[in-house]
Amino acid sequence: MLFLEGKVSKKNFSSLTTGAGNGRFLPDNETGSLTAMERQKRVIALGFFDGVHMGHGALLRTVAERAKELDARPCAFTFDRSPAAALTGKEVPLLSGVADRARLMEELYGIQEVIVAPFDVMRQMDWQDFVAKYLQEELGVVHVVAGHDFHFGYKGEGNPQRLKEKCTQLGMGCDIIPKVEIDGFTVSSTYIRTLVGEGKMERARWFLGHPHTLSGQVVHGSELGRTLGTPTANLLVPQGVIAPGFGVYAGRVRLPDGSARLAVTNVGTRPTVNSDRSAVTVEPWILDYQGDLYGQSIQVEFYTLLRPERRFPSVQALREAILENARQTRDYFAKQKG
């Protein structure tokens, strides 16, 4: 994945070109950077896309379809931080960081480019300028896709109706996507965050359309797992991303080479061996794997909660429980295949 940075009308942005991409780095002193970067038509989805759930998927599938019809690049536009957190001043733990959002959009919906704009800058922009000067003139957008509740621009004065009317005036296409419901519940990042925080990964996967995933760099830990014969990869979770409910999960780990392995992942404070109950760790034991992952990034996928985290009477009892969790994980995925 390639990062492109530069300026658009004197406003900083980043562009993540997914896949192989052929973008180039733009220095900060280069102006008119998007026109310099690539003069090409874009169809774009507007939103924050935290978690890239089934509701977002309705927008992104439409983008891919319109882009094919118009021979344009399928893109998404998002912000560098949560609009809700910026507007309320309260921290909003996220389901996924920017890089994970871009990866999921590419893998699941064929999005080729994700443009990341600074929310604090964009919230000051007149909503009409955002559509005419930013989307159409700077980005070369020919068709816009947004959700039924999307608001943008200064004081949130831009709304779906105004967006559609402005696009029509400018000769741009526009689709407004209605809310998506599953089992009588509106699909939303807020609801899915609650599910993930409670460890309800199977229901979360139903609303996401994919397993909940945490990506991060593998760092050195206490190496207790190695002495137990269950070596774990200690994950450095990105700041601001929600940790699943404390417990042990059956799942998979995607390795740097793109392969996926079964894993037993503990999320919590390791009460059996750790007196510091404030430090939360994410530690997958990757089954049937012996490589060195220190300093590399991996993706941990959570499928189902096997048991809550608990304190065991001894390290040996902990080891036996982990081995049982490994057996349960193998059985779980064997049944999924069947």
Image (spheres, helix red, strand yellow):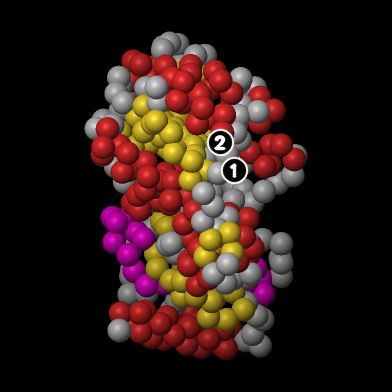
| SS type, badge 1 | loop
Query: Where residue 176 appears, x then y in whole percent?
Result: 48, 41
Query: Where residue 268 appears, x then y in whole percent?
Result: 62, 68
Q: Nearer the viewer, residue 115 or 152?
A: 152
Q: Is residue 6 visible?
A: no
- The magenta stretch is 254-274
Along the polypeptide, which appears first: circle 1 or circle 2? 1
Q: Is residue 128 visible?
A: yes
Callout 2 crowding tier (Cα within 10 Å): few <14, some 14–19, many ≥20: many
> Is residue 330 found left or right of 193 in the rendered image?
left
Quadrant in which the C terminus appears? bottom left
Which residue is labeled 1 in the image? 149
| SS type, badge 2 | helix
The answer to whether mark 1 and mark 2 are in CB contact below 8 A is yes
Q: Is residue 271 above or below residue 101?
A: below
Distance from Cα at disc 1 to Cα at disc 2: 7 Å
